[in-house]
Image (cartoon, rainbow, N blue to C red):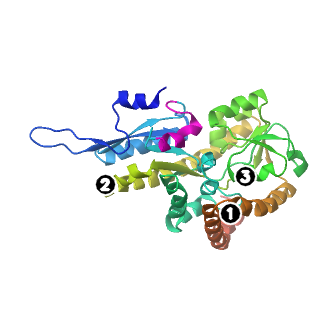
Amino acid sequence: MDRRKFLKNAGLASGTAAATVIGAPAIAEAKTRWIAVSAFGKAGLLGQALSDFARFVGTASGGKLTIKVFHAGELVKPLEAMDAVLQGTAQMGYGAPYYWAGKSSAISFVAAMPYGLNAQEQNAWLYYGGGIEQADKIYNSLGLKFLPLGNTGNQMGGWYRKQINSVADLKGLKFRMPGLGGEILKTFGVNVVLLPGKDVLSSLTTGAIDGTEWIGPAADLGKGLFRVCNNYYYPGWHEPATVLDAFFDKKAYEALSPELRDIVVRGAAATNLFVLSKFQAANNTAMQKLIKEHKVSVRKYSDELLSAIGSRAAEVLPELAAKSPEGREIYEHITNFRRTMIDWSGYSEQAFLENRGKAKL
């Protein structure tokens, strides 16, 4: 499809150009129309989240800003969403920061850091710890504006065809894992594969990969991964929580009025909360279904494996961060915040969860 021809024929404004309609006797308010492209399919929770965000912006702005959503594959391929925004085909994109690692060696740190922050801590970092501003240094360098638009919460470790009990079992595995976790696994001899979500089940079915991480019970159940793999591992050391990113053409975003920018920011913050909450609400029910109905074997990674990966993470992450000034800066920013959270979370969430079972409610 000729994308620019599509835009012309659809009659949609490119960039921030607004169609001003001259009426009689008054001049109507200018209206801005954006196109949004996504790395996620329409049917899933994340497809629904983007549609809801666009609907909110249109309603809250009284139609002054409307966003036409194209889900994965409807206008561009899933992993081409950022290219579409950079090339002017769309004004907004949606995905996960580590999908765009080819654009920046630092951007994966925005999504999740192995052994890093959980979702509650990530949100504290983003909104009150300078995280959005830190991420923007990376996105702005690409000509983009960043906002968080969802969080998966703590993920599961992944699905495997065979049991993984030791470091030796990792060597030679063909495993789908994007982001920094995948970079760490490579050092153990894992053949790490990056695939869009729509290709994961088919790749497992054909044997193109030996295993995959996806998100968590609700999303994994919906994708049908249990049909191919039976060994479901935890914890998700690689993604203790994962930020999903909305990214906007920077010039288009800055051309909005302060009122419209505020609507976009607040709509994104609300969507961020709704996505995390929905994942949390759905995961326990989905996990019980996987275990009781589909007889999935839920296995904990061995202490040997978790210790080895944790030690390797402490070596690899600083090396990955050192590839660019932006990487070094965001890595130091996150690890400094992590130190304070380890202290407070130890007194609060961690201590509570360790003792919650003492009340047999």
Q: Which residues are magenta?
A: 74-87
Q: Residues within 10 Å of mark 3 (few under 14, many from 20)?
A: many
User: Would residue 271 be found to the left or right of residue 286 on screen?
Assistant: left
Query: Cα distance, mark 3 to mark 2?
Result: 39 Å
User: Would residue 53 be found to the left or right of residue 112 on screen?
Assistant: left
Q: Quadrant of the C terminus?
A: bottom right
x%, y% of residue 49? 49, 43
- Residue 279 shows which numbered tag? none
Q: Could you say whether the residue bearing mark 2 is in a helix, strand or loop?
A: loop
Which residue is tagged 3? 181
* Of pointers 3 and 1, the one earlier in the residue sequence: 3
Query: Cα distance, mark 3 to mark 1?
Result: 26 Å
Q: Residues within 10 Å of mark 1 (few under 14, many from 20)?
A: few
- Is 78 magenta? The answer is yes
Please name the amino acid that badge 1 sits on.
Leu
Q: For the residues labelled 3 and 1, say whether their Cβ atoms are less than 8 Å apart.
A: no
Q: Residue at x 29, y 45 (%)?
A: 64
- Residue 353 shows which numbered tag? 1
Q: Residues within 10 Å of mark 2 (few under 14, many from 20)?
A: few
- Is 252 magenta? The answer is no
Q: Dominant secondary structure of the magenta stretch? A: helix
Q: Is residue 21 visible?
A: yes
Nearest to the observer: residue 3 or residue 108? 3
Which residue is tagged 2? 257
Query: Cα distance, mark 2 to mark 1?
Result: 45 Å
Please name the amino acid that badge 3 sits on.
Gly
Nearest to the observer: residue 99 or residue 297? 99
Identify the image quadrant of residue 339: bottom right
Q: Could you say whether the residue bearing mark 3 is in a helix, strand or loop?
A: helix
Identify the image quadrant of residue 332: bottom right
